[in-house]
């Protein structure tokens, strides 16, 4: 594999776990962008957003995207769900990487998010106000779906596949 693979998609679509599996199967380094940002800041995302707002976090995210887009060696990069908001960075990423959109239905996303213990304490809400997690997912997806579609070279539905199946499908499509 001589190109990086950048995984995009909403929260709880499997980007991190699939990214780790891909990195292992392809013998490439794995970068979880959110984890990398947390390590660099020495803080949880919840703290970063509490201190600098989403604008502060997005600035860090954009810088990290640019850094890994310019990597001289192939990587597997799991992007945060909002990474597609940085439209100016994606042309460079797409020159050096295959962008794979991991998709799931809203009900699957909500189910996975509610099963993910601790996500409510480590992942800040994306929308202000008194709205349900279901409404937040629907509203945010409505904004981001066109961006995921615009930047993706490949789409993989993760609703009915386990992480190993998703990784194998990506390898077949990308390296096949």
Image (cartoon, helix red, strand yellow):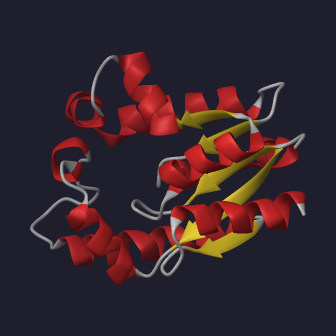
Identify the residue at horizontal 85%, vertical 42% (top origin).
Answer: 3
Q: In which quarter of the image is the N terminus?
A: top right
In the depicted structure, whether residue 147 falls above or below residue 117: below
The image position of residue 10, as x and y in percent, is: 46, 63
Residue at the image position 48 percent from the left and 48 percent from the top: 80
Counting from the top left corner in percent of width and height, residue 153 is at 78, 64
Name the residue: 88% across, 57% down: 175
Residue 41 in view of the camera: yes
Question: In this image, 133 relative to 65: left or right?
Answer: left
Up the image or down, 96 lies above or below 38; here it is: below
Q: In which quarter of the image is the C terminus?
A: bottom right
20 in relation to 75, above or below: below
Is residue 88 visible in the rendered image? The answer is no
Residue 119, position in %: x, y? 23, 51
Q: Where is residue 124 in the image (x, y as percent from the top left)?
A: 23, 48
Q: Quick one: 28 or 38, which is closer to the camera?
A: 28
Judge left or right: residue 1 versus residue 167. Answer: right
């Amino acid at each position: 594999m001589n190109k990086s693979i950048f995984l995009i998609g909403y929260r709880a679509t499997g980007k991190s776990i699939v990214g780790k599996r891909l990195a292992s199967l392809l013998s490439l380094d794995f970068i979880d962008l959110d984890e990398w940002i947390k390590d660099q800041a020495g803080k949880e995302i919840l703290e970063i957003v509490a201190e600098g707002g989403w604008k502060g976090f997005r600035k860090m995210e954009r810088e990290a995207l640019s850094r890994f887009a310019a990597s001289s060696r192939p990587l597997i990069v799991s992007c945060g769900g909002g990474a597609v908001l940085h439209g100016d960075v994606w042309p460079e990423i797409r020159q050096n990487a295959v962008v794979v959109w991991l998709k799931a239905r809203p009900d699957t996303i909500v189910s996975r998010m509610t099963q993910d213990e601790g996500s409510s304490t480590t992942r800040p809400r994306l929308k202000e106000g008194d709205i349900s997690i279901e409404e937040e997912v629907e509203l945010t997806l409505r904004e981001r779906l066109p961006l995921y579609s615009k930047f993706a070279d490949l789409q993989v539905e993760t609703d009915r596949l386990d992480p190993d199946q998703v990784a194998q499908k990506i390898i077949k499509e990308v390296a096949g």
